[in-house]
Amino acid sequence: MEFESLRDYQEGDSIRLIDWRATSRNYRLGRLKPIVRNYQEEQDQQILFIIDSGYRLPDHHFDSALEAMLLLSYLALKHGDAVAAASFGAHDLWIPPRKGMSAYTSLMNGLYDLHSAPVPSSPFLALENALGRLHRRSFIVLISNFREEDDKSLAWILPRINKRHLLLLVSFRESEAEALAFPADTDRTDEEVLETAAAFAYLANRRSLYQKWEHSGMLVLETSPQYISTALINKYLSVKKSGRL
């Protein structure tokens, strides 16, 4: 709820809505009606984009993710939402939430020289940092490349995030693993058969992890670099329509 205006008290209004300072001024002017604060439902939303600039996103994945972030930021600002951005890994960046199209210039300036590097990155620390900085319910879009080992490291912070925010975990498809798991040729050596089995198991474990997160209330998006912009925009519009925020 956000404050909209002051008005005269009406029968049935809660006493908690009375603005005592405005009521006191009213009484001094000889008007004997209490004044209450009028609220309306907040129509805008707040979006935080967090991008992994570490080893998980090679350059071509990172560039596609950054382009998608900027495109969706522009759309969200046009819809009246507040937008914030952050990165973790090679660069620790925080751009506070702002509304209005002037905020897009600040985002462009803050993100223009961002790049990835083969250094460690921690989605857990990125989310913990976001929890400490966000002061209202937000749609958090975290772009990285999530794998089976993230299950344990994120296990206790994801429920905390889920209580206060709506989280979308964005991961890129593993094209090399998919090529190994679903080979075009059937004439395979024993070694290649083992590689295929290992790749298939790897992808199955990833899919199982994503389903686990989805059942817990998180949103998960797995996409390819060339489709990430369209996929993110569709997910954003779906969230806006659903009213989940």
Image (cartoon, rainbow, N blue to C red):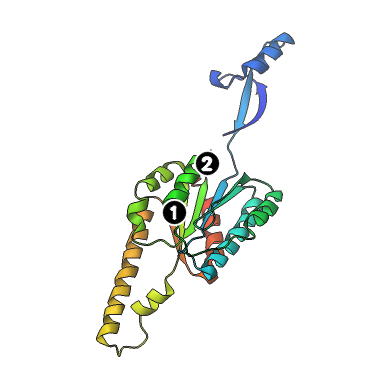
- Locate residue 31, reporting x and y percent: 71, 12
Q: Mark 1 points at which residue?
A: 123
For the question of whether residue 70 can be seen, the reply is yes
For the question of whether residue 14 can be seen, the reply is no
* Secondary structure found at label 1: helix
Tag 2: residue type? Answer: Arg
Q: How far apart are marks 1 and 2 (CA)?
A: 15 Å
Quadrant position of residue 198: bottom left
Question: Looking at the image, which is closer to me, 90 or 144?
Answer: 90
Quadrant position of residue 39: top right
- Locate residue 125, reporting x and y percent: 44, 49
Q: Mark 2 points at which residue?
A: 133
Question: Looking at the image, which is closer to me, 84 or 222?
Answer: 84
Question: Looking at the image, which is closer to me, 53 or 241?
Answer: 53
In the figure, 130 relative to 225: above or below?
above
Q: Residue at x 52, y 60 (%)?
A: 53
- Locate residue 176, reporting x and y percent: 41, 76
Tag 1: residue type? Answer: Pro
Q: Is residue 181 left or right of residue 134?
A: left
Mark 1, Cα crowd under 10 Å, few <14 / some 14-19 / many 20+, is many
